């Protein structure tokens, strides 16, 4: 089962042997959870820090640090090679978002794509 999933995920631009090993080893829930839960589990979902009437900025925290770091590196490459992620990066850049915020958003979208591929067991067109 892991070799079939590995063959499927290596087709994704930005997913090399190190990122692949990290995803398969540290995130066995891949393909079984919804997009919000998998992003939270990987540490890529924004969480609110609020108390009473105080409203703070949402930030990513928690999750599995190794998975977040691996997906961050994959997002660097994928944001240059996958047309949908490149368009997303450019839209966020035009809105004035910070570069690291853009990369975290791209990493989350990449994880959502990988999760959907694992669930369906077939590659998804990313063009």
Image (cartoon, grey):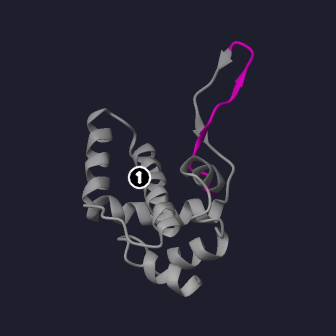
Q: How many marks?
A: 1
At x 54% / y 87%, what residue is drawn? 3
At x 51% / y 62%, what residue is drawn? 115
Q: Which of 68 and 121 is in front in this view?
A: 121
Q: How far across and down, in percent of the image, does residue 4 sit?
A: 51, 84
Q: Nearer the viewer, residue 37 or 25?
A: 37
At x 45% / y 43%, what residue is drawn? 101
The magenta-colored residue range is 42-53
Does residue 57 belong to the magenta stretch? Answer: no
| Left or right of residue 44: residue 122 | left
At x 43% / y 66%, what residue is drawn? 74
Residue 126's quadrant in the figure? bottom left
* Other residues around mark 1 within 10 Å, as few (<14) / some (14–19) / many (≥20): many
Does residue 49 belong to the magenta stretch? Answer: yes
Q: Nearer the viewer, residue 96 or 41?
A: 41
Instruction: Residue at the far front: name it.
Output: 120
| Left or right of residue 86: residue 62 | right
Give the quadrant of the C terminus: bottom left
Q: What element carries label 1?
A: helix
Q: How far across and down, in percent of the image, does residue 110 sit?
A: 43, 59
Q: Mark 1 points at which residue?
A: 106
Give the quadrant of the N terminus: bottom right
Q: Is residue 28 above or below residue 61?
A: below
| Left or right of residue 92: residue 114 | right
Residue 113's quadrant in the figure? bottom left
Q: How far across and down, in percent of the image, does residue 72 sit?
A: 48, 60
């Amino acid at each position: 089962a892991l070799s079939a999933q590995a063959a499927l995920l290596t087709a994704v631009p930005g997913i090399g042997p190190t990122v692949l090993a990290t995803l398969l080893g540290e995130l066995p829930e891949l393909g079984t959870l919804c997009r919000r839960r998998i992003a939270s589990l990987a540490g890529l979902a924004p969480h609110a820090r609020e108390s009473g009437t105080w409203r703070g900025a949402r930030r990513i925290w928690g999750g599995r640090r190794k998975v977040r770091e691996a997906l961050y590196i994959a997002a660097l490459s994928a944001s240059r090679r996958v047309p949908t992620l490149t368009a997303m990066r450019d839209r966020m850049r035009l809105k004035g978002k910070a570069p690291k915020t853009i990369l975290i958003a791209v990493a989350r979208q990449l994880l959502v794509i990988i999760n959907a591929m694992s669930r369906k067991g077939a590659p998804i067109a990313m063009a």
